[in-house]
Amino acid sequence: MIHLVLGGVRSGKSAYAETWIAAQSEQVVYLATSQIWDEGMAERVTKHQAQRPDHWCLIEEPIQLANQLDTLNARDIVPAVILECCSLWITNLLCQEEPQDIAEHTKALLAAVSAYQGPIVLVSAEVGLGIMPTNQLARRYGDEIGLLNQKIAAVADKVTLVAAGLPLSLKG
């Protein structure tokens, strides 16, 4: 089961995704894409960690998500996975010193997600409801995350939009 959970900043999307994946399996792998750039980000990461069950396995991977999913999928017992989050992953790809081929990474991620044998929930920001950004990087980010969200939604069994802590089923 592939489940995409979308929402804005502080929408409740992470809490919703965590509750959903916990209901799928006792064995959960939290695949974290965030990198700590400043004190504010460190506080967010600490807060998220404190909310998660202690028995969940944490894998921190800012770029190579497809490889991590393929490795988990090769286990004898395939764990449930929460991938948090696709929007930070796109940021990581855009901000690397060496330019990253986002199309290739996206293709690999979609293949790994589609082949995954356990339940997986992917968390992503819905950024298409705001104004058009005035700078090139912000416009590219909006374009890339919007396209990625559409591609994941196409292969997902279930898509949920969370706003003000309330889930709205868009698919499945």
Image: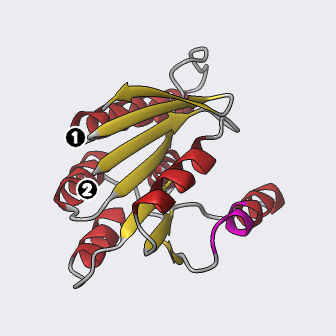
Disc 1 marks which amino acid? Answer: Val
Identify which residue is drawn at 33% across, 38% down. Answer: 158
Q: Residues within 10 Å of mark 1 (few under 14, many from 20)?
A: some
Residue 136 appears in view: yes
Disc 2 marks which amino acid? Answer: Val
Q: Which circle marks residue 43 in the picture?
A: none
Q: Residues within 10 Å of mark 2 (few under 14, many from 20)?
A: many
Q: Give x and y (percent) for residue 131.
A: 61, 14
Q: Which residues are magenta?
A: 48-53
Instruction: Name above or below for residue 105 compared with residue 8.
Output: below
Q: Which residue is mark 2?
A: 113
- Name the quadrant containing residue 3: top left
- Name the quadrant containing residue 38: bottom right
Q: Which circle marks residue 155 in the picture?
A: 1
159 relative to 71 in the view: left or right: right
Which image quarter is the C terminus in? Answer: top left
Instruction: Name above or below for residue 83 compared with residue 166.
Output: below
Instruction: Name above or below for residue 134 compared with residue 11.
Output: above
Look at the image and say whether residue 33 sits in the magenta stretch: no
Instruction: Name above or below for residue 144 compared with residue 73.
Output: above
Label 1 residue SS: helix
Which is nearer the eye, 77 or 147? Answer: 77
Asked whether the beta carbons under mark 2 and mark 1 sit within 8 Å of each other, the answer is: yes
